[in-house]
Image (cartoon, grey):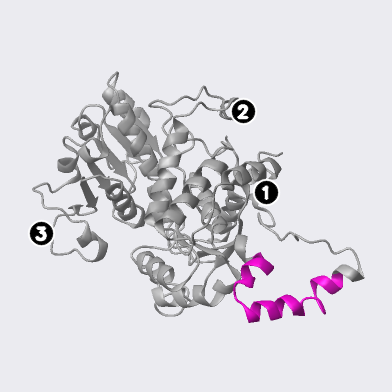
Amino acid sequence: MSNTNNDILTYHQAGKVGMRTTKPLRGPADLSLAYTPGVALPVKEIARDRENLFRLTAKENLVAVVSDGTAILGLGDLGAEASIPVMEGKAVLFKTFGDVDGWPVPVNHCRQNGQNTGKTDPQRVIDTVMAIAPMYGGINLEDIAAPACFEIEDKLDAMLDIPVFHDDQWGTAVITLAAAMNYCRLAERSLDELKIVINGAGAAGMRICEMLKAAGARTVMMCDTKGVIRADRADLSGKKKEHAVKTSDNTLADAMKGAHMFIGVSAANCVKSGQVLSMANYPAIFAMANPDPEIRPEDVAATLGDKPYIMATGRSDYPNQVNNVLGFPFIFRGALDVRARTISLPMKVAAAEALAALAREQVPEEVKRLYGAELAFGPGYIIPKPFDRRLFVEIPSAVAQAAVKSGAAPKQDLSGYRAGLLARDKTRVFLGS
């Protein structure tokens, strides 16, 4: 995959999303149904009972992809307008992988000065999303810088009766947990006995920490640019204070001594070979900074030689890519289908468990052909590939069950849900079908 700049810009020409109609408009009779006078009846039905909004509009399968452009990919704060190609791309992934209709919603004038530069004003984003929420069945927050993103997600989740999900926080966390679960299988260790070091205390790092702890991890140490997030540091506030630990370790190098797992959501080339050597036997190195990881897989291979280890990155040109597309389309699919009011922590853990379990199954031949590799569960394959059609069934099924069980969705009979997903998968456009 060596696309030139011209290839990339040509692909994006005129954008990547557009509208499709779900009902025919063949003549005067259809026109009277689609608009006046026919449209008056569903309007009155919705005014009479808000529940009809999900039955008589596109709301039940429509997700807003919202960003103020303060943390675009690895590019930083370039503004809401520059974020549009990413938001369009997210919408494409929603539809292709999860059969969810996502729509880009870049928001201006949501900074602390009311303009389009400076730090995010959480309340302005909250007010904007609340204002547009009637049309949408879910809100996917995207590329909003920390710490504002935490307050925005938490408050919107509490105020709205539809799922709110900040993918930069939770998407990476779900996939990382799945990878960690399968590392435990291969290393014959349990999550609660691991010493885990997370470098990077932003949105992804914080939620990875929370996900790991929710799944049973007991020893998780976080580092930021100043070193270990220790309980005795006077500069801590918010979520950093929540996850501070009592320790004599000061630096990342100190923390990595004897660690079983390193998780990087930080900066390129910040981990040295000696730090990898200081880790426990059979370590896991998840170096997920993009586009350049905290330490390159080639350097880890040269350092550890024939010793067993597991390597993951955020890149598609190495094995074990921690890619959010394995999570958000399918998590929303399950949440929307059961009318979940929120995406609860049990739903996120269920998604991770289903991902981990799928990686342990035999890989279909069409997936092997697409990736040109003999894929089988092991150190080079601990999480599934995005173009595995089985994700469309396995992840939503697990999420929907967890939603009902955790009380995030109304009580309902899900006995036929899996079969419904299988039938839907056969008719959706995927892989050029």
- For the residue labelled by badge 3, is the local secondary structure a helix, a strand or a loop? loop
Which quarter of the rendering shows the N terminus? top right
Q: Position of residue 144 (x, y in %)?
A: 43, 63
Q: Is residue 339 visible?
A: yes
Pick the front one: 215 or 283? 215
Q: Earlier in the sequence, mark 1 or mark 3?
A: 1
Which quarter of the rendering shows the C terminus? top right
What residue is rendered at 44% in x and 61% in y?
A: 408
Image: 126 above or below 200: below
State left or right for residue 148 relative to residue 49: left
Residue density around tag 2, few if under 14, some if 14–19, many if 20 or more, within 10 Å = few
Pick the front one: 392 or 309? 392
What residue is rendered at 30% in x and 42% in y?
A: 263
Q: Is residue 57 visible?
A: no
Q: Position of residue 50 (x, y in %)?
A: 60, 76
Q: Which residues are magenta?
A: 31-58
Residue 232 tag number: 3
Q: Position of residue 69 (x, y in %)?
A: 48, 64
Image: 197 above or below 89: above
Residue picked out by circle 1: 10
- For the residue labelled by badge 1, is the local secondary structure a helix, a strand or a loop? helix
